[in-house]
Amino acid sequence: MSPVIATVILVAVAITVAVAVAYWMGGIASQYTKFEKVEIQSGVCEFDQAYGNWTITMKLKNTGTAAATLISVFINNVEVGTYGVTSTADLATATNMTTTTSITSGDSIMVKVYIGGSYSTLSSGTAVNIKIHSAGGMDYITLIELI
């Protein structure tokens, strides 16, 4: 066998092994790089005359690769005590986020925030800052105008 053919075979084997190792390392790395990312897709605000409070309904979707656990909601940086979460699959079922709410990757939920008490004096046209805090330390913020 000539030295040129031996060199070509040796280079081909080295490239094949390098590609195999790269795929193997890529598979291992993807297991440890999961992240949460919640998108606030829409927000609608209504005033409820019967109760005298504002109701903000937001649709959230987890577009990350890991489950997101939502633990609290803030309005103008003050934690809200009354809010509820409704699954988009079954709008009749509502749970509250006083414990935690988990959104698996790719799923959507509806979050209803009720603004009353000291905030009930807010007028139509006022913009409020809504912040949803997750257990992973992420904050998801949107600005919603009261209608």
Image (cartoon, rainbow, N blue to C red):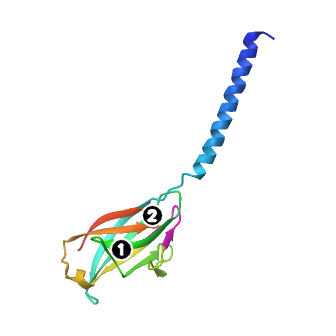
Residue 121, picture quadrant: bottom left
Please, what is the three-letter code of the amino acid marked with disc 2? Lys
In the rendered image of this protein, does residue 79 appear above or below residue 29? below
Secondary structure beneath dot 1 equals strand
Nearer to me, 92 or 102: 102
The residue where tag 2 is placed is 61
Verify whether residue 84 appears in magenta. no
Residue occupying the point 53% across, 60% down: 66
Residue occupying the point 48% across, 73% down: 101
Nearer to me, 99 or 129: 99
Query: Residue 94: percent from the left, percent from the top?
Result: 46, 81
Dot 1 and dot 2 residues touching (CB under 8 Å): no
Verify whether residue 103 appears in magenta. yes
In the rendered image of this protein, does residue 129 appear above or below residue 99? above
Secondary structure beneath dot 2 equals strand
* Left or right: residue 64 compared with residue 39: right
* Left or right: residue 31 compared with residue 36: right
Binning the other alpha carbons within 10 Å of mark 1 as few (below 14), some (14 to 19) or many (20 upward) gives many
Q: Which residues are magenta?
A: 101-109
The residue where tag 1 is placed is 57
